[in-house]
Image: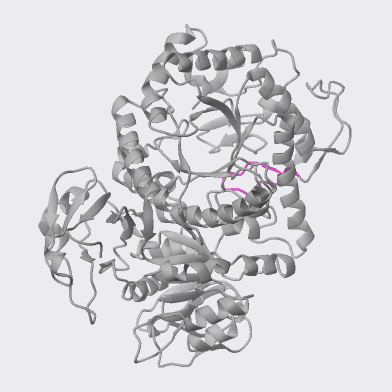
Amino acid sequence: MDVIWFDPARDLDPQIDMLLTRLAPLWRSTDGMHGLCFNVGWLIDLVTEWTGHADQKLPLRSRRTAQWAERSYADLRDLFARIRVGAARIGLPDLKLGVLFVGWAHVVWPPDVKIYDFDSDWYARHPELYGEPKTIIGMPDLWPINRLHADSYPYATRPGGLQDDTYFPDFFGAQWGSLSRFLGVDALHLRDGMTGPMVYTRYGPYGASAPADPAVWQQWTQAVIDLYRACKTGNPDTYLIGYSSGISAVAEWRVGCVDLEALVADGAIDCWIDQTWGGAWQDWWHQLWKGWTFQLANLMSHRVMIEAANMQRKAKGIAPCRHYNLIETWDGWEPWDTLHQVPGKLRWGIWAFNHAAAITPDGPKTTDGSYISWANNRKGQILSEDDVTYLRTHLDMAQESAAKLEHVYGPLMVYNRPMMDWLMHHHPDWNASEWIEDQVGLLMKWGVPCLGATRIEWLPDVIDKADGLIVQVPGQLNDKVRDLLLKTDKPTLLVGRADLIDPALLARAGAKVTGELQPAGFYHLTGWVKEIVHLPTFRPIEAANDGILAALDSEVGPLVAREKDETSKSFFACWQPCDWAEPGNAFLPKYQLGSTYPYAAISAALRNTLPKCLEPVEWSEPMCFHSWQSSGTLHIVMGNLETGVLGDSRTERTMYLVLYKESSSAVPTDFSQRSLRRVDSTDAFELEHYRWSRLINQHGFWNELAGEDAAVFVLEFTGEPQ
């Protein structure tokens, strides 16, 4: 929350008591760490400008922070001390307090509206630390690899000023150590741009890719590791929190030049928060490919990276890095209000994000908790009692279910670290169609129920637990994994540039590469659907079957080839997917809308192979569906999530819920005794014992969803779980 919510001209204790009493039910619902993270002017000036003198004025330069700009560092310390006393008084003695910072030089955005209007004395003194603006907000980005020039400012840890060629991580870490001890805070949250300048769009410090020289990205990764290490060294008691880019976890390395897995494995970072602001970007800013389903996919890829890094930490005797999802309420500075405008979508996010699982050899691993976006909004209101009850109720139910998670249904997203590592060490600047989160995020929009991710090296231990596989650029494979994929009968989709996919797997999919590499650009589909799609650099393929998925043929050949086996109902296909024409444009412009059609077509083919799904999900009416089993009970979450060119969540959808496909086995006799109920309702709806459930509208509760966008259901039954 914002420090400026407190009025320093009035008695602080009643304000503190009111705030803590209001939020206490959320904290009391947890059985682990809980706390409050404060925004004190966004910029790192609070740390860099600290001289070590208690009476120093706070370095705040905004119309909204004017009252606190007249206050001192001692006043800020007093506020935090009073909050601790108030928390202990109401039975929360372990409440943690932290501060957050963004990495931009200054924040004056949007240029005309100026929701944010922060200028920086630090930036005026050291512009050499920042690179040209690359993010969508157009502010100069922190480049921790740059060296600082000499100055004579009396810093707390360098009272004689900085020497020329000072390394920013060393300076910042020392300043943080001094300041954090003075203020008595527990946590440091390094937010937007502090873990690399690729945020909000797939556009990093060098554009749409890393440079061709591997030494460049390695320098960036090391600088970020050094920054986290220095902060931990400055104050070893700091709970050190990182923050995602809001974009693909793969792109944070491949484009942003920062390897999260290496950062986590190093051991200084204590917690990673995925900024899963689905509603802000989907329903307000209209930046569609940062919306709800994309954030779910981003969360899953971070899950498998962090789990693998935690295995390395365990081997070194280091405690694991925690991983949190973000649950958005409203914003402290921007006008949107997800909690009150689209509460059904927020409920979808609470349930989906808390069940997003890394499927590891030791079982499914979900996130460790939730980070609620803001306690206050831009008008100075705080969450109401009803708001707190809504959040607590669904977070408690969702996290209780996630703690007992047994299985997620649907295909698994498979992260191929060996291929990413090979690319980064040999061809960092290539586009290999490796953007698995974007691809899965779009497939979800047309009903593909992907709620779990795994790593390609874990496949031998987890493939039996998968309903299917969506595999990221399956090349650079060891023999065991290759043989496993060649023999699997699981529905399998191989995604990526064809010449980088293992040739034996391509052959199984009925394809081989042909011709030369084709340049990125717009191409025409030549099947029965005539759309214009945007493809990255790709290698044409020849399909060795009879035009399976012929609707996805293009003027340079098929985009998809599928194994054709008349004796098998298996699905095994390779796919060169469409990509964004402008990686720096998060708005999905209308001239690129045709590129979403292949995702709808692939989704339909995948859904036909799954035991639980929605049908139909038309290209023009996207609909999201996921399911899992906790404590022997099947849970279903459905959402009409789109706002914008892909769909309108205010428009009803008519779907069939497919629970059984026809097979050689008879429908279980207890099927007629099953019922479906909402998790927040006692009403149950009987299901008929047909292959298809009855039309959902006929049960009367889908009309209710038209106003709520999304809902979570539990499938109850008698007898043994099926």
Q: Position of residue 546 (x, y in %)?
A: 40, 93
Relative vertical location of residue 214 with respect to residue 153 in this rendering, above or below: below
Q: Is residue 694 visible?
A: no
Q: Is residue 35 left or right of residue 627?
A: right
Q: Residue 60 at what x, y percent from top left?
A: 62, 22
Q: Is residue 174 left or right of residue 582?
A: right
State whether residue 400 is above or below residue 577. above
Q: Which residues are magenta?
A: 130-144
Tell me, what colour scheme is on the image? one colour
The quadrant the C terminus occupies is: bottom left
Q: What percent of the width, then of the height, locates residue 330?
A: 40, 35
The total of numbered circles placed on residues is 0
Dominant secondary structure (helix, strand or loop) of the stretch shown in magenta = loop
Q: What residue sits 53% from the left and 33% below the top? A: 114
Q: Nearer the viewer, residue 62 or 490?
A: 490
Q: Is residue 137 magenta?
A: yes
x and y percentages locating residue 497 in the rendered image: 57, 76
Q: Residue at x 47, y 6 (%)?
A: 11
Comparing 35 with 463, the one in front is 463
**Quarter of the figure with residue 584:** bottom right
Residue at the front extreme? 720
Q: Is residue 694 magenta?
A: no
Task: Give the side of residue 418 with respect to residue 303, left or right.
Answer: right
Can you tell which quarter of the image residue 142 is in? top right
Residue at (51% x, 79% y) in the render? 485
State whether residue 660 is above or below residue 675. below
The one of 475 and 362 positioned closer to us in this rendering: 362
Asked if one can make out residue 50 in the rendered structure from this viewpoint, the answer is: yes
**Residue 552 location, quadrant:** bottom left
